[in-house]
Amino acid sequence: MKRRDFITLLGGAAAAWPVAARAQQSDRVRRVGVLMGFDENDPEAKSWLSGFMQGLTELGWSDGRNMRMDLRWAAGNPDRMRTFAKELVDLQCDVILSQTTPVTAALHRETQTIPIIFVMVADPVGSGFVASVARPSGNLTGFMIWEPSMPGKWLELLTEIAPAVRRVAIMFNPDTAPYVTSYSLPSFEAAARSFQVEPIVAPVHSDAEIETVIASLGREPRSGLVLQGDPFTEVRRALIILLAARNNVPAIYPNSGWARDGGLLSFGVRMGDEFRRAAPYVDRVLRGAKPPDLPVQLPVKFEMALNAKSAKALGLALPPSIQLRADEVIE
């Protein structure tokens, strides 16, 4: 396995809080809210959250002693996001960890005062969460999940492992990934022109629409799929992987959980690392720091996972270039 460490443009801002400062504990029990966009039964999401909690423990925070954690799971449902956002704000949390863009948007609508540390947000500036990555304003800051060039990279890798593809759809839910049109599509369409592939924009809002998109790709020879991750598609991971396999559609996915669950190929941010990096930011807020003083951080660790069994089922030869670069190969 190889690890890819990318140096953030804003490196150093998330350095651990000085040891002496950590030792100064307040008598008041602090309230930390956590609003997850994924389903509580998702093992990947549970492991990411565990890393965040471990990070807080290492920084001196213990649930039930000097901190109380209020955890909610929205399961990709915008109504649940809005309901739970209001609940956490009404609880007057000292800080809230927010996972994904739509969850962060729901919380932002509810409060402009409670500090919010976001993770897995693609375009915090375009979404109106911060004024800039270097100098956030208001009550939000956090960790970006990718830069706008990522969809182009996904398409490049898909054409590398499935060189016969000539039309590729990028699938997403515009309700839970509203940033895709302005943030992701330019890179995807530019890459499509470069690789002489027909780009297809495929917004979906339901299981039936997902099935329609993938089935239509399966009926057309040499079609592929780029899956733009968002809470809606993530909670339907098993369905999408099954439909892609059933319709013989090669697909690339945004994080390694998809490949482990049977998806062909994944490339994206090492999610667990993003959650671990969020713990020092939450710690600093609990000790008095303000979100505008904490720059938004770019992703620093990426990983590629390849499912060799799925590639064989699709009749794809495994390029040595992909195998050598993969951090994980699932046989």
Image (cartoon, rainbow, N blue to C red):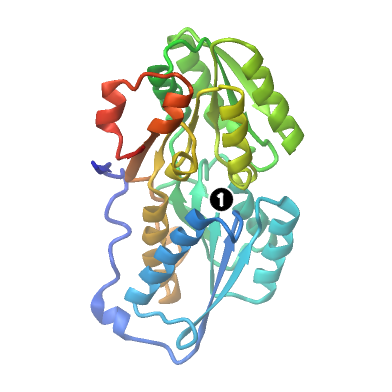
Q: Quick one: SS at disc 1?
A: loop
Say which residue appears at 24% left-offset and 42% top-offset: 1
Say which residue appears at 75% left-offset and 55% top-offset: 79
Say which residue appears at 43% left-offset and 46% top-offset: 133
Q: Which residue is mark 1?
A: 100
Residue that extends furthest to the top in the rendered view of this protein: 196
Camera-nearest residue between 119 and 3: 3
Place of residue 314 in the rendered image (x, y in percent of width and height, measured from the top left): 48, 22
- Pick the quarter of the image with the C terminus: top left
Q: What kind of residue is marked 1? A: Thr
On the image, which quarter does residue 284 sit in? bottom left
On the image, which quarter does residue 242 sit in? top right
In the rendered structure, the answer to whether residue 176 lies left or right of residue 118 reads right
Camera-nearest residue between 316 and 129: 316
How many numbered discs? 1
Name above or below for residue 42 compared with residue 111.
Answer: above
Place of residue 51 in the rendered image (x, y in percent of width and height, measured from the top left): 40, 64
Residue that extends furthest to the bottom in the rendered view of this protein: 27
Place of residue 96 in the rendered image (x, y in percent of width and height, measured from the top left): 55, 67
Place of residue 81 in the rendered image (x, y in percent of width and height, measured from the top left): 69, 57
In the rendered structure, the answer to whether residue 232 lies left or right of residue 271 reads right
Camera-nearest residue between 39 and 81: 39
On the image, which quarter does residue 126 sit in? top right
Camera-nearest residue between 247 and 169: 247
- Can the viewer see residue 64? yes
Name above or below for residue 93 compared with residue 79.
Answer: below
- Can the viewer see residue 127? no
